[in-house]
Image (cartoon, grey):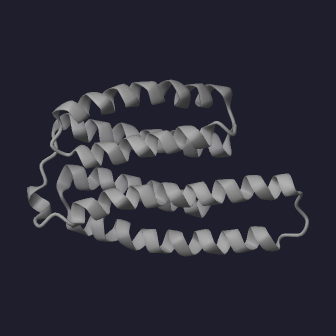
Amino acid sequence: FKRMFHIILTMADSCLEFAHKKDAEKIVLIIELRETLLKLTEFNLRIINKTANQSVEQKSIAFFSTWNIGVLGKMWSYLAKEWSEQKKLQKISLSNKEIIFIDEVVQYTRDYYQLHYKTDAAILLKIRNKRYHLRKEGFALLETSKNKSMIFNLLSIVEKIYDMSITY
């Protein structure tokens, strides 16, 4: 799982860096990392299926985590793909509020990573409380942003992380 998480965190950080610097190489990196993540997800799922010394419950939890971590990576890559489909990456206009929102969702992703490896009630509470803040902020941005699809995608990431945190 750790390698999958590191790929997702790199994807999230690269989205944030692109938002700040408009570096097209970050978009290419994210799309390449998605392919790596897909292969790693499939590999991990095959290992889980072949593992004989785990109970059904342990296999189910491992399968759930692997699958959802893969989905989370796809969600970050959708954001990069959306940006890459625009004709001139340098002309993508993001407001300061949108960049701050991206940063907060990246940090939210990091919080989930911490929760996964250190199940702690304080981190879990932080994730649950932060979700409401991010939803409120995201919905407010939907009313003013020209990048509604990006905001919807980021809100989907927030919801996916929240859904995954419920298992702790």
Point out residue 72 in the picture as x, y percentages from the top left corner.
Answer: 49, 54
Residue at 46% x, 74% y is 35
Say which quarter of the image contains residue 45: bottom right
Q: Can residue 100 be seen in this view?
A: yes
Task: Give the image quarter of residue 3.
Answer: bottom right
Q: Where is residue 111 in the image (x, y as percent from the top left)?
A: 52, 39
Image coordinates of residue 36 in percent, x first then y, are 49, 73
Vertical arrangement, residue 6 with respect to residue 116, above or below? below
Res 10 visible: no
Badge count: 0
Whether residue 40 sits left or right of residue 22 in the image: it is: right
Res 155 quadrant in image: top left
Q: Which of 85 and 15 is in front in this view?
A: 85
Residue 154 lies, with reference to residue 26, above or below; the image says above
In the image: residue 157, left or right of residue 163: left
Residue 129 screen position, x and y as percent: 51, 24
> If the image is split into quadrants, where does the N terminus sit?
bottom right
- Quadrant where the C terminus sits is top right
* Residue at the image position 65 percent from the left and 75 percent from the top: 43
**Residue at screen point 86% across, 57% down:** 56
Instruction: Using the image, determine if residue 83 lies above or below residue 119.
Output: below
- Asked if residue 62 lies left or right of residue 93, the reply is right
What residue lies at 53% left-to-right and 42% top-to-bottom?
Answer: 161
